Amino acid sequence: SGLDTVNTPKFTSNISASYRFMAGVLPVDAAVSWARGGNYFFEPDNAQLSKQPRTNIINSSLQVSSPDEKYSVQLWVKNLSKEKYFSYAQQSGTPGSKFSPAPPRTYGLTVKATIE
């Protein structure tokens, strides 16, 4: 019928980079990723009210490990640029659509220990 398929962007792209360097005797891993997507419809009738906007999601992390790499601490950030988009949307029987926002910028600290 000439309408776009649901949840199907015409173009997506992903780029990531990581770099390892030594801070004295400690290995440090830095990483960043960028994902471009969105610009698609959630419903088969292609209603503008249920359209995912174009998205640019940037995630980043920095990890410091012990010299034997049995222990590590990682700082991470997801959705660094505070992109506003939806995890899903659904048209309802009443006028309008129901949307569930995707997580905003989140950040945290992960501590790892490898026990043999």
Image (cartoon, rainbow, N blue to C red):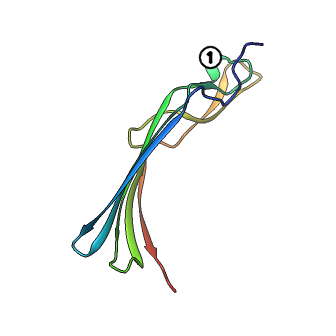
Position above or below: 114 against 40: below
Residue at (64% x, 23% y) in the render:
50
Q: Quadrant of residue 34?
A: top left
Residue 83 visible to the viewer: yes
Q: Which residue is mark 1?
A: 48
- Could you tell me residue 35's position as x and y percent? 48, 39
Q: Residue furthest bottom?
A: 116
Task: Name the amino acid, label 1.
Answer: Gln
Q: Residue furthest left?
A: 24
Position above or below: 111 against 93: below
Position above or below: 21 against 65: above
For mark 1, does the 10 Å Cα neighbourhood hold few (<14), some (14 to 19), or many (20 or more) residues? few
- Could you tell me residue 45's position as x and y percent? 73, 18
Which of the two residues, 108 or 6, is positioned nearer the viewer here?
A: 6
Which of the two residues, 98 or 6, is positioned nearer the viewer here?
A: 6
Residue at (41% x, 58% y) in the render:
108
Q: Secondary structure at mark 1?
A: helix
With 35 as the anchor, is 45 left or right in this view?
right
- Could you tell me residue 26's position as x and y percent? 28, 73
Which of the two residues, 52 or 114, is positioned nearer the viewer here?
A: 114
Residue at (42% x, 79% y) in the render:
70
- Could you tell me residue 23's position as x and y percent? 23, 68
Residue at (74% x, 25% y) in the render:
92
Residue 105 visible to the viewer: no
